[in-house]
Structures are given as C-alpha cells and as structure tokens.
Amino acid sequence: MASSQKPAALIIGAGIAGIQAALDIASAGFPVVLVEREPSVGGRMSQLDKTFPTLDCSACILTPKMVDVGQHPLINLMTYSEVTAVKGEAGAFHVTVKKKPRYVDEDKCRGCGECATACRMTGRISDTFNQGLGKRAAVYVSFPQAVPLIYTVDPTTCLYLTRGVCGKTFKCKDACPSDAINFQQKEQLVELDVATIIVATGFDMMDPRQKPEFGYGMYPNVLTGLEFERLCSAAGPTGGKIVVNGQEPKQVVFIHCVGSRDPHTGVPYCSRICCMYTAKHAHLVRDKLPESQVTAFYMDVRAFGKGYEEFYDRVKHEHVLYRRGEPSEVYKRGDKLIVRAEDTLLRKSIEVEADLVVLATAVVPRADVAEVAAMLELERSPDGFFKEAHPKMRPIESSRPGIFIAGCDQGPKDIPDTVAQAKAAASSAMVALTRAASSAK
Amino acid sequence: MQVDTQELAERLSLFGCIQCGKCAGGCPVSMKTTLDVRFLIYEALIGQLPDPTHMEELWDCTCCFTCVERCPKDVKPAELIIGLRSLLVENGTIPKTVTDALQGIFRQGNPLGFAREQRADWADGLNIKAAQEGCELLYFVGCTPAYDLRVQPVSRALARTFQAAGLDYGTLGIEESCCGNEVRRVGEQGLFEMLVEEGKPLIESTHAKRMVTTSPHCMNTFKKEYGLSGVEVMHYTQLVAQLIADKNLEFSKKVEKKVTYHDPCFLGKQNHIFDEPRAILQSIPGVKFVEMDRSRERSLCCEGGGGRMWVEGTNMEERLAFQRVHQAADTGAQVLAVACPFCLLTLEDAVKVQKLDDRLQVMDIMELVNLAL
C-alpha cells in the first residue's frame, strides 16, 4: 500500500509535543505534515539547559527526536512555514501552508555557517533564541543542533532585504561554498489535504515589565527564568558560565510566582512549572558557583510530579534557602540589588542583597493566540489557552471536531505531561486516520 | 474594646487572602515600625485581632496603597487599617491631634485650625471668578494650598498659569471645604459622608466641565469616592502638561537647574499619573531632568498621607522623608520637584533636618513653571 494514498495528519508546531505526536503517527504508518514557523524544530525545550527533576540535559534527550522527525520517510517537515487556512471538516481538511522564503536554497545549503561569519551584521543582531542575551548575524541557524541545519536570512535585519543594498557585493553570497544564497526566493503557498490536525503551538512567557516593581528591563541583572536557562546552557551566550555584568554573582535571589496567580496580569492560574524550574535553577547556581548564597522567595511550593518533592528536598539540602514571602519590590543600593519582602514566617520585613535576581515568570498563551484560534476556528478557555471539548472526559479534543490539542497551548504543563498529552493526541489522531482510511476503501 | 472580626473580614473581603506577604513586604513603613498588615489580615480571619485601642502602630499607615496596588488577590489590605481606625473613631480613642484636625474640618472646613473666612486670602489681588457664577474649569484649591504659607505660592502659580493660558476658570472661594480624602482614611466615615453630601452638589452646581486640583489627595477622592457626574476630575499636572503640548502655554525664561522628581503616592501609585509631571519638567527650558532609582511605581512614600500630617506615628526618628531626600541629593539634582502639597512640606522639612539645604531645594512643579513663564 503506497503511503501517499493513506490519509495524512497535519501537526502545527514542532516543539516536543508536535515532534512526539509526529513520530508516533508516522511510526504507525500514516503520513504526517509537521509545520513549524521557526527555522528549526525543537521549540521551547531546545532553549532549556537541564530538565527537572532528573537533570537530564534537555538537548541530549530532545536532539535524537529532532533528528528522527527530520529523517522519517513519512514525515514531511515544513519548517519556516505557517498554516494560514484550514477549510473542510474532520476527515477531509483542506489546508494552506505559507512557506516563507529563507533566501537560502534548502537543497544546496550544507550548514557550514560561512555566510554567517561573512555577514556584515555578524555579532550585531539580538539573538532571539538566546532571549536577546547574545548576538548573531542576519543570516543564522537558531542553534548548532538545528533540524534542518539550513541557514535562514532574517528579513527584518538583513541589510539587503531591509534597505535594498548591502555594500558592493553580497558578503554571504560570496562566502557560500555551495551557492545556496538566493535573494530571488519568494513566499510559496502549499495546499494540502489531511484527515486530522493536532495543534501544538506552545506558549510564551509573560513580560515581567507588567510587574514594574521588580525592575526588569531597568536592571541588567534582573532576568527571567528563560533568560537564565540560556545563561546556564553550555550552548548559550556565555558557554554555560553564570556571569552577569561581567561578574559571577555571589548572592542570587529567585522570585516565585511572578505574574502567576494574579488576575491583574491576566494570569489567575498557577503556571505549574515555575516552582520546579526555580528549584532546578537554584541547584544549577549552587552547582556552578559553590561559594554563592542562594535565596528563593516563595508563597507556596508546588512539587506535585513524580520525583518533584524529592528534588525540592535535594535542593534544600544543597543549601538553597527558601524564605516564605512574595517579594514586593526590587531596587538598588550602591552596586547591589535589594529585594524587599516580608519573611512571613519571621513576621518581619526584610531587605536581601542580590547580584542577580531571577524572576519565575508566568506561562501565558502565545501572543498571537487570538488570530490562530480564529484561523483554526478553535474556542479558548477563560485563561486564554485553547479549550478542550470537555475538561475531564475529552481533554485532547478541541472545540472543532477532528482537531486535537497537545502541550502548552492547552495550558501550562511540564515536559512529562506534554509528552503524555502529545501521545494521547497522536492516539486520537490515529483513530481519526484509521476511520478515514477505512471509509476511503 | 470588642471587635466583630467576622463582620470586618466579610465587609472587606479578606477571605481571598493567600498570605503571600506582598502587602507588608512593600509597605514603606514596615521596616521601621511593628505594623504588619498581612498579619493583621490573618488575625482578622482567625478571629483573633487584638484590641485596636492598644495598637499605636495603626496610625503609622500613610494610606499610600502600595499594598492595595500590589495585592494579587484584590484584598485591599489598607482598608483593614482604615476599618480598624474607624472603630477607634466610633470609640473616641484616637490621638488628640487627629481629633483636633477633624473638629477643624467639621467647624471651619479645614484641618489646620484656620477660619473659613480666610480660605480665599491666598488669592488676594488675583481677581479669580467665583465658580458659582459658572465657568468651564473649576479649580479646587484644597486646604493646605489655601492656608499654608509655604504652599500658597503653588496655588498662586497655578492661578497665574490658568490666566496665562486664557482659561475660563473659577474657585469656590470661602465656600470650598475639605475634600475629606484624609478624613475617610483616618476612619471618620461619618464626617466624610457629610463632606460628600455638601461638597458634591456645590461642585455640580457650577456646571464646570472640568475640575482641577492642586493636591493628588483631593483628586483621588473626587475621582473615586464622590460619584461626581458631568465633571472630569484631573490633577493640575495633567492639565498643565496638556496646555504645554497644545502650545497654549509658552515659556519665556530659562530655569538652569538639575531637577529630579518624586512621585506622590496618590498621583503615581494610586492613579498611575507618571508621565505628565515628567513631561512638564522636561519642557521647561534649561531644566536638566534626572531620575532617582526609586521612581514611578517604586517611588518611596514621604509619609505625609492618610492623616499622617496630623499624627506622628511610632518611630518618628527614622522618617522615610529623610531617606528620600538623600536619594534625591545622590542624583546630584539641585531641585527635588514634587506635585503634592504634603510631599512638599514633608520633604522640605527633611531637607532642613538632614542639613541638605545648601545642596537641595524642594519645589512644587508649579513653582518651576512659574519661574519660566
């Protein structure tokens, strides 16, 4: 039986949820179209350093799966592409995918990076993959393990694409040994027929400027948790060294629940991952900087997953000081940041000095969730995430028959829950695919 | 005295409190006094509030409302303090200086001990129209700007500015009474309601489209607690910034000074007016504007609000105003600009006590504007 005659599944988003669902469905023998808007698959998980509670290196457990989706004969990987329309109904969806021009010929590029070294903008463009902590060129791969390992010219920063001129010759074009740079590339629209769809578009982190009392954006040594991940990562901008303002911090303060559990920031819910990623961050600081003092301010510690409470215990034994009280303000005194809080167990207001403050910011829906929901005709729950058909009995199905949801686009969750939900979505999708296959006979 | 804590907890919706400590953690006086509003809420919830007549620290609260602004659960911690103060008012066990201020307001319409007949003396020679005859803009002067000799120049500068901009404005003259913002915050709910009952129809009778106040405290209560209809309430910084932006007010002189700005709690934190005062300062020719580290939402309270102009509170040695003027001086500024009469008085006093008066001058924004006109 030729696979091309079998009904196919579309998966939107190639983070760990989309990757896992794609691998499961393809392994069952159904073709999959995996669409990712970034130049590489991997999603948020590829930005993480270690993973709680086992401290597995995120890249080490993710990269093999990324490679698998890149090589699987039944997975049609469409990176740097976006779904723009979904017509039809369960069993017979008609989908339009916009393939954005990379200005790099995918068949020719060997991923050597000569173009990026040659680019006039090298070291001048804020590196979004590194949360702005590093710099890159206008032609780039997000990270060295990118799948596919194909360079992309950033249309918002490339001198030629923004100003129409880049010196006398194109440095990138001259440098490329395989003549892959192609500024003639145009956007393409690809039409697809699929029987079912899994939406796994992920999440964003709340901008902590919504909580101006913490001084984020004002002090360079107030970071978000995701920025701190990049600082810890061996593949990050500092090669894994925890360095801020050119120095190793001696006193590090973590603040839990920044934006979460707070209806004023639009996040009335618990973001579920912050307690554990903060415990992991605290561990990393103690591990990498044994002389450091680490304080974590919390209001409740929610260590509910398998091995989580045990990890929290471990981190406390590593001399991470947990103090109960949600800090109210961060300000400066001399060279130090001051974290002002009430230690509610002491019943006393305190000032704690810090060289680095890390904010455990809330998990929020993607910034463009409203447009994506409208395009896919999906309902959202009051928290802004995609709504499931029934919160208990049909947690994988969306409000539109034939479309399933997986991962953090349905609500905040950790990696184990994301993978489990992705496998559940794959299972539901395979039911739909099997039904479509038998009705076609 | 007995406190019905259940009634308090119900009325103030304390049950949503998660005891996170963000309120007390951000409370400007909590480092220097025993006041812990988070713990008070807990005591109220479990029905074990101590007798408030023995809680001297209840008078430490400046009603800056940092706790209310930052509470993630809408508990409004400061309202518990106001609620407890109101029990003390009913019980008649309040500091004598507060009683004197309240009696002054009841008898003469101001807390400062002056006669009502003197209320418009600040405006002698300015030929200000009586708003009762009708005007587009009602200027609500306020008690301290009307009577206090240090603040009167601010009111006069405002009046001159309105004249320079050609506005059709008037005041309530000697009929103007205290707005009651601090009255409500020291817990005298009855007197506050009386002031609203008398003040609201008086203000509405002018048919002014806009009302501008000198003090952010007056603006706050008019905006949020009076239920005024047909009149837009604004602080003078909003109006003056607009006049400048629309080129209805032009400066002819330079003020060659390095200036920093202190955000008043009732203007900034509580009403989110941060940009207009800065816009005015930056538009004055010659002014070099610098920010303090603690600015905008993180501004440090001067301790003049919530009735604190009438009662010292505990630990008067460590005034927040002392810290604040040092923060201002550390920026190298020659002028600490304010936009609130209470901030003007508390900070100017602190500059003198801290012997910074050879380096730092406290001025209201309107005084700087007046120098440039």
Image (spheres, coloured by chain):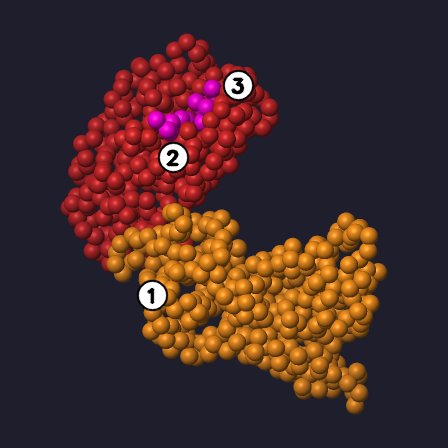
Magenta stretch bounds? B358-371
Toward the viewer: B196 or B220? B220
Find numbered disc 2 in the image and state the secondary structure of the residue it sits on: helix
Q: Which chain is red?
A: B
Q: CA distance from mark 1 to mark 2?
A: 36 Å
Residue assigned mark 3 = B253
Q: Residue at left 37%, top 41%?
A: B300
Q: Quadrant of residue A313?
A: bottom left
Residue assigned mark 2 = B329
Q: Check disc 2: other Cα within 10 Å, few if <14, some if 14-19, many if 20+.
A: many
Q: Are marks 3 and 1 on the same chain?
A: no
Q: Residue at left 58%, top 28%?
A: B245
Disc 2 residue type? Ala
**CB within 8 Å, label 1 to label 2:** no
Q: Which chain is orange?
A: A
Left or right placement of residue A318 versus residue A407 in this view: left
Find numbered disc 1 in the image and state the secondary structure of the residue it sits on: strand
Left or right placement of residue B49 versus residue B321 in this view: left
Toward the viewer: B264 or B134? B264
Residue assigned mark 1 = A321
Disc 1 residue type? Leu
Q: CA distance from mark 3 to mark 1?
A: 57 Å
In which quadrant will I find the C terminus of chain A?
Answer: bottom right
Q: Position of residue B21 (x, y in %)?
A: 33, 55
